[in-house]
Amino acid sequence: MDMQQLMQQVKNDPQIVQRVMQSPDGQKLMQLLTSSDNGAGLGHAAASAGSGNTAQMVSMLKKVMQTPEGAALLDRLSSQLQR
């Protein structure tokens, strides 16, 4: 599943986000996405994604994926979303 498909799935099923974000991996992802600016960037990216522009969210997730820890984390979360 590529990033665009993942974002579409999340858009189609908002409850899936809640389930995944309550998991330990989801909590770790939130830490990674909010640590640099106390969540301001994530807030803007989420607002844009809600309006249909997922570019900022995709960019943030790509940055997370650049680290081995982040890549493994997103792989696990992607598996959870596919269930």
Image: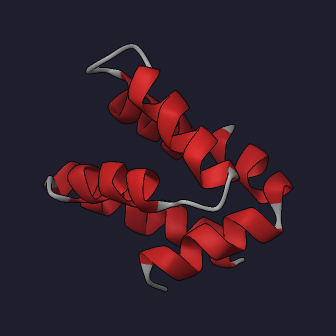
Residue 33 placement (x, y as % from top left): 38, 34
Q: Residue at x 42, y 60 (%)?
A: 55
Tally of numbered discs: 0
Q: Residue at x 46, y 64 (%)?
A: 76
Image quadrant of residue 9? bottom right
Q: Residue at x 68, y 53 (%)?
A: 51
Residue 22 placement (x, y as % from top left): 69, 37
Establish if 80 lies above or below 25.
below
Between 33 and 68, the one nearer to me in the picture? 33
Does the rendering let one see residue 40?
A: yes
- Outermost residue toward the left in this view: 67
Say left or right for 67 vs 78: left
Image quadrant of residue 8? bottom right
- Outermost residue toward the top in this view: 38
Quarter of the C terminus within the rendering: bottom right
Image quadrant of residue 82? bottom right
Does the rendering let one see residue 23?
A: no
Q: Residue at x 32, y 20 (%)?
A: 35
Between 38 and 15, the one nearer to me in the picture? 38
Say left or right for 82 vs 2: right
- Outermost residue toward the bottom in this view: 1
Residue 26 placement (x, y as % from top left): 55, 43
